[in-house]
Amino acid sequence: MLFGSYQLHCLECSHRFWTNIFLVSKVLHAKCPKCLGMKLDRWDPKHYHVPRWKTLLISLGAHRYRCTRCRFNFVSFRLP
């Protein structure tokens, strides 16, 4: 990662390309920190073990997101 650029590859054709994540349209929206996917759902903390630091962020107003592609649970202050 150099100045916000990531090298990604397409899962269907394995084409590799570089993308800049500091575009205004992408900075405003939440994305999965694992796969950079933007298709997100909400998750309920009753069904998962939530670490204390995530609980603190949720109490400060962070949103609970779950990536539909890689099924990773995370919290973020950005909007979907």
Image: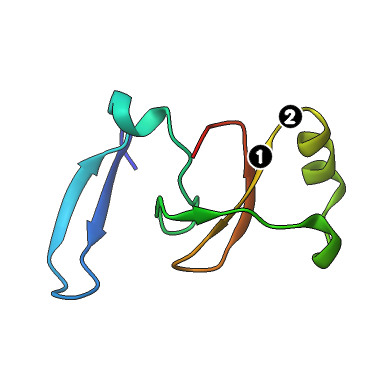
Observer able to see residue 8: yes
Residue 22 in sight from this viewpoint: no
Q: Which quadrant does the N terminus fall into? A: top left
| Residue 65 percent location from the top left of the image | 60, 50
How many numbered circles does the render carry? 2
The residue at the point 15 percent across, 54 percent down is: 17
Residue 43 position in % (x across, y down): 68, 57
Q: Is residue 60 above or below residue 66?
A: above
Give the SS element for disc 1. strand
Q: Which residue is at a point 81% across and 42% down the rendered structure image?
A: 53
Q: Is residue 11 above or below residue 43?
A: below
Left or right of 20, for residue 63: right
Q: Amino acid at mark 1?
A: His
Residue 24: percent from the left, percent from the top? 31, 24
Q: What residue lies at 25% left-to-right and 52% top-to-bottom?
A: 7
* SS for dot 2: loop
The residue labelled by disc 1 is: 63
Q: Which residue ends up furthest to the bottom in the rendered image?
A: 12
Q: Nearer the viewer, residue 41 or 35?
A: 41
Q: Which residue is pictured at 81% across the width and 67% down the height?
A: 47
Q: How far separated are the C-alphas under marks 2 and 1?
A: 7 Å
Q: Residues within 10 Å of mark 2 (few under 14, many from 20)?
A: few
Name the kind of residue labelled 2 in the image. Gly
Which residue ends up furthest to the top in the rendered image? Answer: 24
- The residue to which callout 2 is attached is 61
Q: Residue 8, located in which quarter of the rendered image? A: bottom left
75 horizontally vs 46: left or right: left
